[in-house]
Structure formats: structure tokens, C-alpha cells
Image (tube, helix red, strand yellow):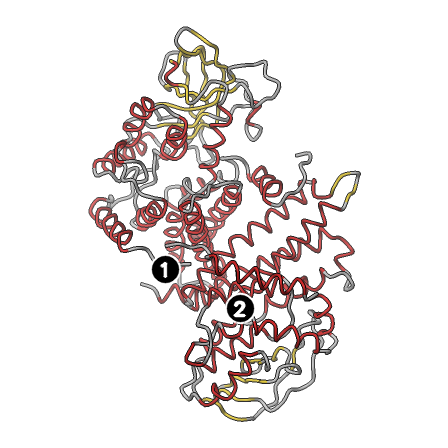
Amino acid sequence: MRFLLDAEQRAFAGSLDAMLTAADTPSVVRDWSRGEHGSGRALWSRVAEAGVFALAVPAAHAGLGPLPVELAVGFVELGRHAVPGPLAETVAAAALLAELADPGPAERLLPALLSGEASATLALDGSYALDGDAATVRLALTAGGLRLAPGHGPVRACLDPARRLTPLTAGGELLSTAPPVEHALTWARLATAAQALGVGLTLLDRTVAHVRRRTQFGVPVGSFQAVKHRLADARTALEFARPLLFGAALTMAPADVAAAKVTACEAAYATARAALQLHGAIGYTAEYDLSLWLARARALRTAWGGPAECRAAVLSGRAARP
Amino acid sequence: MDLTHSPADEAFRAEVRAWLGAHVPSVPLPSLETEEGFAAHRAWEAELAADRWSVVSWPAAYGGRDADIVRWLVFEEEYYAAGAPGRVTQNGINLLAPSLFEHGTPRQRARVLPSMATGEVVWAQAWSEPEAGSDLASLTSRAVRAEGGWLLSGQKTWSSRAAFADRAFGLFRSDPDTPKPHQGLTYLMFGLRAPGVTVRPIGRLDGKPAFAEIFLDEVFVPDEDVIGEPGQGWRIAMSTAGDERGLRLRSPGRFLAAADRLFALWRSRDSPAWAADRVADALIGARAYQLFAYAHASRLLDGGSIGPEASLNKVFWSEYDIALHETALDLLGQEGETADTDWSEGYVFSLAGPIYAGTNEIQRDIVAERLLGLPKGRR
């Protein structure tokens, strides 16, 4: 029992953090929101070079994994820097393709996903796909099986402008009649939970910096107890989401991952509410970078199973135990 | 990163489980906040101690098993999963003993710890005073130098279990002329039945005498009952306060077992949908607390220490405890109104959580100032 990240895992986080800090992600996010994908694609290849998309794929398919703990470490950093694009979707698609009984689709599609040349989006039956216009591989999980969607419908404007939802066109090549849906969902939720934790951590950091600097009544706003307590609560919520995330990465039990997902997303969302309140009106503007993380926290809360769905998964997981 | 226990730790778990399976009373003991229940719990402590299960993390010389923090967590998981009784000795074991291990003399340890481990001497914490709660440094009860010891005078209050306990430990002002309020304090142990001591039980919300006021009128305490150096009481007590807010006082095992009992209660009431999210949150919270503890234990085993993170911990478990019990009472409906069930007992107990061991307002200040680096301000 040693429930701490090791030196290599911490170094992985550090190198991703350094790379993303240098990449000026806020301007990449703004480009992405306008449907200009060039800077995002460039960043995408660097994330792929760091190995992030290979972590969910076993070595038999030329991946590095499955390494869910490392994936969680990586996705916390992606969230901290608000990296845009179908990140969790590409990971889930890669994990799904690698598990298909027929190795054909994996042999054909995985290499480009792992190298970052391609990105994937993945939609459950009837749901929108994230970034269907930008992704090069569009997978639709329907009642009839897993299909390679031939195209996408109109792009919907979203509360998080950098998350662009599209329907997927029906039909297309049938890749599998019995895809491991729960496997894909587990990876998608794990990645989303980690991303949400990262989003929450940045919202907290930026807000702490703001309330230390901003003065009212002649003193820093951060010296007021009401302000302190709101941020202390945010810190508490985020700190108790972290062990759930890494515990879930170790077990990959669907109920554990659902618990991590709901907890990390609720913590990030509560932090977003505190961040907005404590920034005041400037936090309510699109031109201030905080908005990128505020909008992301709201969107991740719903992505891949909202709070009620995840809690239901926790209860059924418990019911299955003796 | 690893959550699996070593074969040796699993063997320890099996040993704990087997012992508890053979010894845990089949009928719950009466509330330890009553005279009858206190006596029954004291007898249970003696039974635990007879087979060296009362203080597993202590050195063998004092009746323990030298269990490291991971094994202590394993013990607690098994203890509460087995439905074993609440610990009447917890104030002594979790608050006084760590101070004695760190600051006491070998003679003090030899004198105090064995009878604490068996429950023969049950200890109460005597810190708070009528005008010194969260602002503990403002305490005014005195220790005046006397031949071979000290004379204690003043009043302590909100002293948990002092109504039936044997001895107490607390801070006293030994030098009234220091420039700062947390200087000139001395940490002392005293007998609750010593001449000059008057204990007045106080009924908590449900009327049970869970705590008491202690009046001291020139109570003589020998030098050997001073913990650490006179005048250094604040520093010594603060190391104890960290223990109180940290893991030891509310072990994850207790909440894992409580969340499982809540889940079973929910299912036995046909799994009403209105409570589903709250029951799920109870399961999730217990797991979060367990894993947070494992991360914490890993840091301690690496040579780290519990710092201001203990305050995060305290805010989390105290609010979690109330939410869990509120859900149970709501599920019980009218039955939840009755005062003689484990759930109602646990509920009343949980309500005190955000108040004692430093109020949650103070804990949030500590998190904000020491973990987030926010400036000090008016409280």
C-alpha cells in the first residue's frame, strides 16, 4: 500500500505542465471556439507526442497502457490548462477500438489516433458528439453496434464556446455489433473526472491570486472571513476528489470511476461558482480568461453522465457487493 | 501508486477479524454517555486490552502491537465493520497519549499509559473554559507554584465524558505576566476526584451527561504530572490538537461501516428514490475519506507529518457525519424521532463535530491562511 504518485508520475505531470504553460492555451481555446482548429491541432500533436492518447491502449496495439493512473495525471494537467478538443472522447475511442473482438478497425484507426495525426469523437446513441466538425474519426455507439459515422450535422453553439456539439450522421460502416460500451464509458468518465479536477484547481489558484491582489475597504478582499471560507470549502472539496480519482484509476471499477466523476465535477463546479462570485463582474466577462475554465466546469459536469447518473452507478456498484 | 495491502497486513486483518468475530458483544452496549453504558464500555476496553487490541499502534511495552498507520487503518476498518462498541477511552488514547509519547518522560509513560490502555483509568480532556473556546489562548484557570508541585484553580467546561471519567488533562496559566496569551501556559494532568475538584455533569441536547464542568479550588498536582516544560503548554497542546483534527479521532473505518449501514437501511426501506443521491453521497464520502487517509498514511510513512491538512480533514468528516445521520433519520421517518437507537445516538454525537476540536470556522481560517496563503484578517 503506497497511495502516492511516484517520481516518474510527478515528472510526467511536470513536463506536461511546462509544455502547456508555454503553449498559451487561452488563445488556442479562443481559436477553437471560433472553429479555427489550426492552433488546436498543433497543440494536439504535442499532447499526443507526450503519450497521452497511448495510455489507454495496450502494448498489443502499440499503446503504452493500459495506464489509467498516468492517464489521470495527464488529464489533470489538460484540465488545468483548459486544453480544448475531444480529449476524453479520443481516449475512450482508442480504448474501445483496442477492445473490439475484430482487430481490423483498431489496426486501421488506432495508429493515427496514438500519434495525434487524427482525433476521434464518440457519441452514445442519440447524444451529440463533441467537436464532430474537428474530429477525424467519428464513432457512434448505437443499439445496433458501433458505427463509423460518415459525417456530422450542424454545429451547436454551447455554453462553453470551446466545446462544439454536433449530431452525427446516421449510417456508416459497422465496426462491431457488440462493442464494450461500459469499457469506453469508464475511460471517458475517468478522463473527464481528471480534467474536471484540473479545471477546479486552476479556478482555485486564479481566484486565490485575485483575492490576494484585489483590495476593497483598504484591505485585500482575501482577508475577509466570508471570502476565506468559500475558498477553504473549495479546497476541501477538491482535495477529497483527488484520492477518489486516483483510487478509481487503480481499480477501474465502473462504480469507483462514477464516484470520482461526480465528486470531481461537483467540486470543480462549486469552485467555479466561488471563482465567479469572488472575481465579481470581471469574472462575468468573456474577455477575461477565467471564463474559459468557468464554462468548462459547467460542461464537464454533464459530459459522460451527470451527477444523478453517476450516483446511480455508485449505488448499483454497492448493491452488487455482498 | 498502490492500494493493495501486503500479505503481512492482510494476515493482520484476518487476525483482527477473527478476534472481533469471537468477542464483539451480540447486543449493542448501552450509550457510553450514561453511567451504566460507561461502565459497560470500560469493561469492553478491558476485554480488548487483555488480548492487546485496545491500542494497536502503541509499542508492545505499553500494551500495543507496534502497528504502523496502515495497520491502524486496517484495524479500524475491521473494528467498525464488526459493529464493535464506541471507544470510551478515545480522549486519552488519541489526545493525551500522543503528547506523552512526544513530550512525556519515560516515568510518566510507564505510570499513565498501561492503565489507560486497559480502561482502568479513563481520561477526559479539560481544555475549554467559559471564556476560552475557539480562542483557547485566552484561558484564565491558574497553576500556582507550590512545594513539589502546583495548585490549580479555575473552571473548565465542555469536558467530554468528565462526568464519569477518572482523570483529566488540560492547560493552565502558570505565568500571568507574559506578553502574549499563548505563553506562560503549562500542560498538566489531574485527578477528577482529587480534593478541591467539583465535577458538574452537563446534559447535551438529548439530556445525556456527555460532558461536564470542572471546578478547581487549589487542587494540588505534583511536578510529575506536568507534561513537558512548565510554560511550554501551548506548543505541546497544539501538537495534540493536530491529532484531534487529524485521522485518529474519526477513523475512516467508522464512516465506511456507517455508510454501509445506511445503504442497508435504504434498501430495507425499498430504496426510496428521494434518498438515492444522499445515500450515494454517503458511500462516496466514506470512500473519499478512506482514500484520503491512505494518501495521508503514505506520506507519514515517507517521513512527512500532518500539518494544516488536518483542518481540511476535520471540516470534511464533521460535516459528512451530520449529513450521513440526517439521511438515516429521514429514512427512518417517525422512528427517527425516537431517542434510543444507534442512529439517533450517532446523530446527536455528530452535531457536536463542527463545534469541538476547534470550530469549523477556525479550521476554515487555517485552511485559507496556511494552505491557500490568504492574508490574516479580522475573525
Residue at point 70%, 43% (across, down): A222
Q: Quadrant of the N terminus of chain B?
A: bottom left
A174 left or right of B181 in image: left
Foreground label between 2 and 1? 2
In this rendering, position of residue B331 left or right of residue A80:
left
Q: Check disc 2: other Cα within 10 Å, few if <14, some if 14-19, many if 20+.
A: many
The mark total stands at: 2
Query: What is the crowding at mark 1: few (fewer than 14 residues within 10 Å), some, or many (at least 20)?
Result: few
Give the structural element (helix, strand or loop) at label 1.
helix
Report the side of A153 relative to A140 (left or right): right
The residue at the point 52 percent across, 83 percent down is A111
Residue ID at (21%, 44%): B23
Residue beneath disc 1: B268
- The chain containing the residue under callout 2 comes to A
- Residue B309 at x, y percent in the picture: 52, 44
Q: CA distance from mark 2 to mark 1?
A: 35 Å
- The amino acid on which the numbered mark 2 sits, given as a three-letter code, is Ala
Give the vertical position of B33 relative to A158 (above or below).
Answer: above
Residue A86: percent from left, percent from top: 60, 75
Q: Is residue A283 left or right of residue B17?
A: right
Observer-nearest residue: B335 or B39? B39
- Chain of the residue under label 1: B
The residue indicated by pointer 2 is A191
The percent position of residue A90, horizontal first and vertical second, equals 55, 77
Q: Amino acid at mark 1?
A: Ser
